[in-house]
Amino acid sequence: MLRVSYTDLREALRKSLLYLGLTEDRASLCARLFAETTRDGVYTHGLNRFPRFESMIRNGTIDIHAEPTVTTSFGSIERWNGNRGIGNLNAHASMQRAIALARQNGIGAIALANTNHWMRGGTYGWQATDQGIFSICWTNTLANVPAWGAATPTIGNNPLVIGIPRESGPIVLDMATSQFSYGTLAAYSKRNQPLPVDGGFDTAGNLTRDAAAIEASQRALPIGYWKGSGLAIVLDMIAAMLSGGLGTHQIPTDPTRETGLSQIFLAIDPTNLVSTEELSHIADNIIDNLHQTTPADPTKPIRYPGEQTLHLREENLRLGIPVDPEIWQHLISAY
């Protein structure tokens, strides 16, 4: 595996995006979001996702010039149309507007319709926590997980993100409602490694840790079985209903043409309720108690959501970011 510096990765992405036709400011922000995702160890939704992103621009699924527009607003909530623009730029703008509304009103919400894949969902949790804001956001997806009891994909793996600000390091939960995202399944399949726990069903209907078998059956396992299935359904409903956008069953099933997604961004500003110091003290006590728990495996300490991200961020900035040599070569030769 090749390692490159964060600066080199970000610059290569920026140049490639300029070559694809983005304006300088949009290319710079989009490149930063892709680079930060890769820096933080979410390789499946960073550089490794870029070739599909590029193909979706070329096939017209993503309109690189489109920006989100407000269609309706009332109090602390606004409905936006993403106009099928670049997913991570639409999501970044939506979360930033939710934060602005929260600064004014204590809470802010954006319901975004007609957008594209937001790449790493955790990006928008980190975006909020870095500004001292609590956040909850989620997206629907194409149908890629069977509802509990179904034999074919009927619901999305609808990622859910919750961000909690803390002075000594934010807590950011970033989870799909399938046990493993399809990006993670692809990564395990490429390495020919078994999943650490059952991740779905094979074509014969047996639970398996074989990522390739799950990719072939398209029967990924919802988290918590029927509970994850139910959660995915209600997240899809709220996003589509509040945004006026598409539900999972209406989204194109071709991954290279997955568009028209519905998303929700909630932001909460706690500053008029409690001091930053008190908030951090509460969070620190909870985390201290968690870290004192005896692990089942002494080689695997108990971690809070986002702790491993901070570790990988530091390591990758120090050693260089691991990149797929083939994808890296394609990137730097594209412009």
Image (cartoon, rainbow, N blue to C red):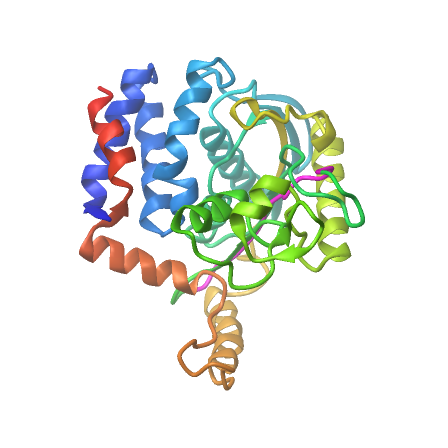
Q: Position of residue 220 (x, y in %)?
A: 63, 47
Q: Eyeballing the image, is 50 above or below 274?
A: above
Instruction: Tell me what residue is drawn at x 70 percent, y 26 percent.
Output: 246
Q: Residue furthest right?
A: 149
Q: Position of residue 103 (x, y in %)?
A: 53, 45
Q: Residue furthest front?
A: 204
Report if residue 164 lies within the magenta region: yes
State which quarter of the image contains the C terminus. top left
Magenta range: 153-166
Badge count = 0
Going by the image, does 223 lie left or right of 282?
A: right
Q: Is residue 309 left or right of residue 100?
A: left
Looking at the image, which residue is at 40% across and 79% down? 299
Q: Is residue 265 in view?
A: no
Which x, y percent locates residue 181? 55, 47
Please tell me which residue lies in front, 24 or 273.
24
Q: Is residue 303 above or below residue 213?
A: below
Residue at the image point whose x is 44% and y is 56% from the top: 193
The one nearer the camera, 214 or 301, is: 214
Image quarter of residue 162:
bottom right
Q: Can you give x and y, in whole percent of width and height, for residue 127 in the image?
A: 44, 46
